[in-house]
Image (cartoon, rainbow, N blue to C red):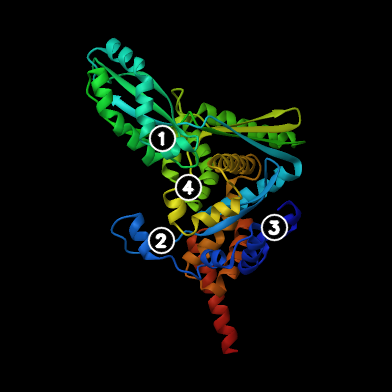
Amino acid sequence: METKRHLTEGFHRISRTERLRRVQDLCELTQNEVDTISGKKTLSLDIAEHLIENVIGYFPIPLGVATNFTIDGRDLLIPMAVEETSIIAAASATAKWIRREGSIRTYSKGSLIIGQVQLPNVRNVTHARRALHEKREVLMGLANACIPSLVERGGGVHDIAIREVQRPSEDGTMLVLHILCDPCDAMGANLINQVCEALKPRVEEISGERVGLCILSNLVDTKLAVAEVIVRDVDPTVGKGIEEATLFAQADPYRAATHNKGVLNGIDPILIATGNDWRAVEAGVHAYAARKGSYQPVTAWHMEGTDLVGKIEVPLAVGIVGGVTRLHPLAPIALKMLKISKAEDLARICAAVGLVQNLGALKALATVGIVKGHMQLHAANLAIAAGAEIHEIAEVRDRLAEVLKVEKRINLTRAKEILEAIRVGEHSAAVL
C-alpha cells in the first residue's frame, strides 16, 4: 500500500462510491466482497439464527475506515464499525500527524490465555497445593490430550500456576489453578473452558477437595499488546497539556474512566468489524487498569525534550479464526483489509489505534477543547434527528456549524429551527 498512499488523501471529501473503489484497490478486494460491504448483498437471517437466539432481524452499524496509519512501517487502512461521530475522523487526523512527525511501534508480551479451576473452600491448603504441584505435568498432559490439533499447531497448555485467594468476609482459603494456554490464532474462550472442565475430576481426585467454577479469565495479563508513539518537535504548550492530562487520569479515577473510554473508542470498532468479542476485551482492559488497587489510565504520555512519547500496554485476547470471525460475512473482509496473518498482529494494531485515538482526544482537550471538533461532526446527526431529508442534511449541518462558531453550542431545538427556516424559504421561492 506504500506506493498507493495518495489514494487515501482527502478520503473524507470524496463520494462513498469512490471511497469504496479506492478501498477495493488498496486492499485487493473482490467484487463480491465490495458488494457485501456496500449492502448490495444482504446479510442472511439464516446466518443470524446460528449466531444468537430468538432472531428477528439485524441492527446495522456503520462501517468506515480510518486512514493515514503507518504501524511498524506498514501503511494500513483500519476498518472500524462504530456509530459514534468523530471517532474515525479523530483517529485519521491524529495518525496523519504522527506519520508526518513521528512513528508508531508495536510488540507483544506473552501469548497465553488463562483458564481458572477454583477450589472454593480448601480444608488443607498445604496438602492440596503440594499434591497439585507434584501432578502439574500429569494435568498438563491431560489438558493437551483434549486439544490435539492445537498442540500440533504449536499451541496448547504450557503451564499451570496455583494461587491462594482468601475468602472474603470469612475464614478460609480458595485455591485457584491457572491453566495457561497458547490458543495460536483463536481467541480461545470455548477452548479453554472445555479444558478446564475436563480437568475438574482429576483435580478433585488429586487434591481431595471440591472443585467449584471452571471458566476462563478475561484478565489476560499473560497476553499483552504494547504500542509506543513518538511525535517529534511538539509545541511545548501542547505537549505539556497532554502530559498534564495523563497526570490528571493517574490521580483521579473519575477522569481515568473517561480517559480509558477514549482508548477503547479506537479498539472496540476494530474488534466489532473483525467479529471479535469486544465485551471480553473491555472487561480485561478495565480490570488491568485496576490491577494495582486503584483504577489507572492504560496509556501514559510525557515529553522527552521536544518529543512527545506515549505508550499503551493492555491485555488483548483476540482471534482471526473460529467463531464470528468466520461466520459473519463482513468479518473476514475486515481482516483482509488489515493484511494480517496472525492474531498477534490484530492485537498489536488494536493497541496502536487505541493509543492514537487517546492522543487525538488529549490533544483536543489540551488545545481547542473536545466540543468544537466533535460538535462540528455531530451537526449532521442533529440534522437527521430534526427530521431533515437526505437532500437537506448538508445545509442544516453547515448552518449549525456557523451557529456553533458564534454561540459555542448547538442542540436539537436549534437544528429544528434551522430546518424550518430552510423549508419556509424553499416554499416562498416556489410560490414566487
Q: Which residue is mark 2?
A: 59
- Nearest the viewer among 68 and 369 is 68
Q: Which mark is residue 218?
A: 1
Q: Does any portion of residue 330 appear in the rendered image?
A: yes
Amino acid residing under circle 1: Asn
Residue 301 position within the rendered picture, expressed as x and y whole percent measured from the top left: 63, 31
Amino acid residing under circle 4: Val
User: Image check: 218 left or right of 432?
Assistant: left
- Tags 3 and 4 in contact by the CB under 8 Å rule? no
Q: Which residue is mark 4?
A: 321
C-alpha span from label 4 to label 2: 24 Å
Residue 178 position within the rendered picture, expressed as x and y whole percent measured from the top left: 38, 25
C-alpha span from label 1 to label 3: 36 Å
Nearer mark to the viewer, of 4 and 1: 4
In the image, what residue occupies the spot 76% across and 31% down? 306
Mark 1 and mark 2 lie on one chain; the one further toward the N terminus is 2
Q: Which residue is mark 3?
A: 8
- Nearest the viewer among 314 and 176 is 176
User: Image check: 89 left or right of 62?
Assistant: right
Nearer mark to the viewer, of 3 and 4: 4
Mark 1 and mark 3 lie on one chain; the one further toward the N terminus is 3
- SS class of the residue under badge 4? loop
